[in-house]
Image (cartoon, rainbow, N blue to C red):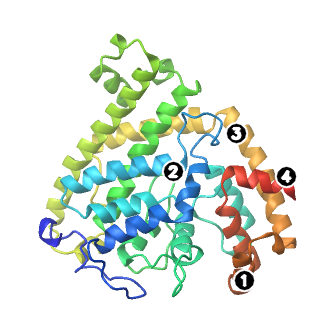
Amino acid sequence: MSEELICYAVTETRSRGRVFTERPHPYRSDFERDRDRIIHCSAFRRLEGKTQVFTPGLDDYYRTRLTHSIEVAQIGRTIAKILHLNVSLTEAICLAHDLGHSPFGHAGEKVLNCLMAEFGGFEHNQQALRIVDLLEHPYPDFTGLNLMYETRLGLVKHRSPYDKPQDDTFAEQNCSLEGQVADVADRIAVNSHDLEDGMRAGLISSKQLKSLEIFTEAQSRINAKAIEDKTVRRTRTAKTIIDTLVSDCIDASEKTITRANLNTVDDVYHHSENLIVLSAENNAKLMELEKFLLQNFYLHKSLIQTANQIKNWLEQLFERLCRRQKLMPGYFQQLAAKEGLQRTVCDYIAGMTDRYCLKMLEEI
């Protein structure tokens, strides 16, 4: 593998390895094993029942955290492959980047952060690290998944307009280029797919979007006026936006990497600014879309009403579990003595699917 990758890509020989030493696998690389461990862990499965924008079960066509994560991984693989980076590491980070999300999406995260204000707060990137280092425990000799250093680094350093890393766990200024690819892939996927889902839900209309250059250019490329089926038109528009941004990311990143004159992975770590980027022109267009989605979709009155309900639900559940910790599984009851009651209750709630959270509220 290392011979096929560029000199500043992460490889097994350049890696800082695992906390607990393990024997090499006969036919899988260490980063392939990380990817597989993430796919097989219970936290990854539960993403199927966690809100992306719409609550799972409301409609079969809307995305969940799980489908979003898979779509991010597909975009990330494409970019990493063309740039001669470590595809398996990129895919592992992409698949795991949302493991720490609470039920009910960003609204749930805000509530947990408020509830935990006196106990260190709650931030889903840090929570993802807690999950892979502590809360998952499928092995007899250690807790966590024992992932490679660079996979864990990519989770904690994950950046987006909605993710502001607050990390003092790792000394590096930045993560690897593979982690940076995951950042851009997430941003591309979330905006194009939330646009598609918002239009499908009828909360966003084509008329509203005519002022957005990124939308009108995509519609022009597919000759949208000639496509009668609304579903096909929406889908092709979103996919065209993805294709445009992925191609732009590859071209722009090749230029920034060349200017940075990288020779090693450490050169990447010491570079404070991301080197996997969009061009200034397309970044501005994407920012315009992000602003539009915030104002017209995420803050839509129907979603705001749901957010107010979520606050009440999680506050009730948090208070009840703090008073009756025996309602939690035995592993979490044992964890409370070491990690603190409030942090453990937060861990337990954060791991719930939307449906299980509501079911538990009804039961107690």
| Residue pointed to by mark 2 | 66
Instruction: Give the residue type that dot 1 points to.
Output: Gln
Where is the N terminus found, in terms of image quarters? bottom left
**N-term mark: 3 or 2:** 2
Is disc 2 placed on a helix, strand or loop?
Answer: helix
Q: Disc 1 versus disc 4: distance between alpha carbons?
A: 25 Å
| Residue pointed to by mark 3 | 304
**N-term mark: 2 or 1:** 2
Instruction: Give the residue type that dot 2 points to.
Output: Leu
**N-term mark: 4 or 2:** 2
| Residue pointed to by mark 1 | 334
Where is the C terminus found, in terms of image quarters? bottom right
Is 8 situated left or right of 123 in this image?
left
User: Are dots 3 and 1 in contact, CB under 8 Å?
Assistant: no
Q: Disc 3 versus disc 2: distance between alpha carbons?
A: 23 Å
**N-term mark: 3 or 1:** 3
Check disc 1: other Cα within 10 Å, few if <14, some if 14-19, many if 20+. few
Is disc 3 placed on a helix, strand or loop?
Answer: helix
Instruction: Give the residue type that dot 4 points to.
Output: Glu
**Relative to residue 104, is residue 345 depicted above or below?**
below
At 80% across and 58% down in the image, what residue appears? 315
| Picture quadrant of residue 202 | top right
Which of the pair 259/247 is nearer the observer? 247
At 15% across and 73% down in the image, what residue appears? 263
Is disc 1 placed on a helix, strand or loop?
Answer: helix
User: Are dots 1 and 4 in contact, CB under 8 Å?
Assistant: no
In the image, residue 298 lies at what x, y percent? 59, 39
| Residue pointed to by mark 4 | 362
